[in-house]
Image (cartoon, rainbow, N blue to C red):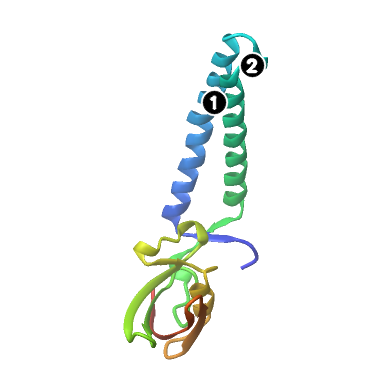
């Protein structure tokens, strides 16, 4: 996938909105905080000024990082997802052969991972172990607790 970050359209919109907010709201607020701190006098011992400058630096770094992420982000067209094997954004139903429990995970990019919502990152050990597998195959995943075996039952969108 060559370093691209594949996300759903919804996630991309959220990311763009965050970036927009940082530029339109947080950036002017950071500049104002610096201006206000400057008015309070001697910059050498002005902790408020230092804090405001540092906050602005962190904000700019965050904006730059977000722009970098967005530049490498592609929306994955759900119609083009191949469900014959496990890939990003597929929903995989597995049987954990160790516990005989059935689980369903959706494989997502790192930014979208949310275990409570059943979304696991393609870069996680389980995600990596499942990628490319077909229904009926068994994925072996090296986990801290030992090797987990998952039988792939079903792949859907």
Spatial separation of the CA atoms under disc 2 and disc 1 = 19 Å
In the image, residue 128 sits, relative to residue 114, either above or below, namely: below
Picture disc at residue 129: none
- Secondary structure, mark 2, is helix
Q: Is residue 157 visible?
A: no
Q: Residue 34, located in which quarter of the rendered image?
A: top right
The residue at which mark 2 appears reads as 45
| Numbered disc in front, either 2 or 1 | 2
The foreground one among 9 and 105 is 105
Sequence-earlier tag: 2 or 1? 1
Image x and y of residue 71, in percent? 61, 50
Crowding at dot 2, Cα within 10 Å, few <14 / some 14-19 / many 20+, comes out as few
Image x and y of residue 125, in percent? 52, 73
Image x and y of residue 155, in percent? 40, 79
In the image, residue 73 sits, relative to residue 47, either above or below, namely: below
Q: Residue 48, located in which quarter of the rendered image?
A: top right
The residue at which mark 1 appears reads as 30
The N terminus sits in image quarter: bottom right
Residue drawn at the location 51% of the way across and 35% of the way down: 22
Residue drawn at the location 44% of the way across and 53% of the way down: 11
């Amino acid at each position: 996938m060559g370093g691209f970050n594949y996300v759903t359209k919804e996630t991309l919109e959220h990311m763009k909105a965050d970036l927009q907010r940082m530029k339109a709201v947080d950036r002017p607020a950071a500049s104002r905080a610096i201006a206000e701190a400057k008015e309070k006098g001697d910059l050498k011992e002005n902790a408020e000024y230092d804090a405001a400058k540092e906050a602005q630096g962190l904000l700019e770094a965050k904006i730059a990082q977000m722009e970098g992420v967005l530049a490498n982000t592609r929306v994955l067209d759900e119609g083009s997802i191949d469900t014959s094997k496990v890939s990003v954004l597929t929903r995989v139903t597995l049987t954990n052969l160790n516990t005989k429990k059935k689980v369903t995970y959706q494989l997502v990019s790192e930014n979208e991972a949310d275990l409570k919502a059943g979304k696991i990152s393609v870069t996680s050990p389980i995600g990596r172990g499942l990628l490319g597998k077909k229904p009926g195959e068994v994925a072996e995943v090296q986990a801290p607790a030992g090797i987990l075996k998952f039988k792939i039952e079903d792949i859907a969108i």
